[in-house]
Image (cartoon, grey):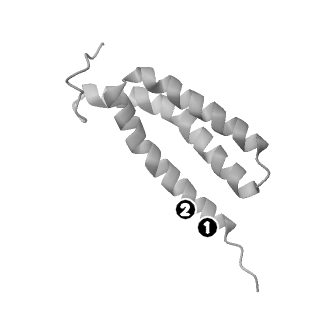
Amino acid sequence: MDMNFSGIVIGIATFLVIGLFHPLVIKAEYYIGVKSWWLFLLLGIVAAVASLMVDDLTLSILLGVVAFSSFWSIGEVFQQKKRVEKGWFPANPKRKIRK
């Protein structure tokens, strides 16, 4: 009986990608602010296009996960700004926060 580990690999990688994007959003908002949304948009577009062009199914799926995690992060950057304003996360003292 042959085992197919693709599902497990994709599941673990998806878990790690989502886990990676959480601190990326926090750091991006802290150092750049909400202007960082365009970086997530650019990464998402590049990953989505790459997903369409890759022959390997597993890699294509993982690039799709990165793409849509990036797109989701755009909204999270704006939510992170609100969390900072509520005092749940520290504000960058070197960057002036505009309301």
Q: Say which quarter of the image contains residue 22.
A: top left
38 lies above or below 24: above
> Circle 2 sits on which residue?
12
Q: Residue at horizontal 21%, vertical 31%?
A: 87
Mark 1 falls on what kind of element? helix
Q: Are marks 1 and 2 in contact (CB under 8 Å)?
A: yes
The residue that appears at 48% across and 25% down in the rendered structure is 37
The spot of residue 95 in percent (x, y) is 26, 20
Placement of 52 over or under 35, stated as above or below: below
In terms of depth relative to the viewer, which is nearer, 80 or 50?
50
Q: CA distance from mark 1 to mark 2?
A: 6 Å
Say which amino acid is labelled 1: Ile
> Which label is found at residue 36?
none
Q: Identify the image quadrant of the C terminus.
A: top left
Q: Position of residue 2 (x, y in %)?
A: 75, 82
Badge 2 amino acid: Ile
> Which residue in the structure is indicated by mark 1?
8
| Picture coordinates of residue 58, whole percent (x, y) | 70, 57
Point out the residue furthest to the bottom here: 1
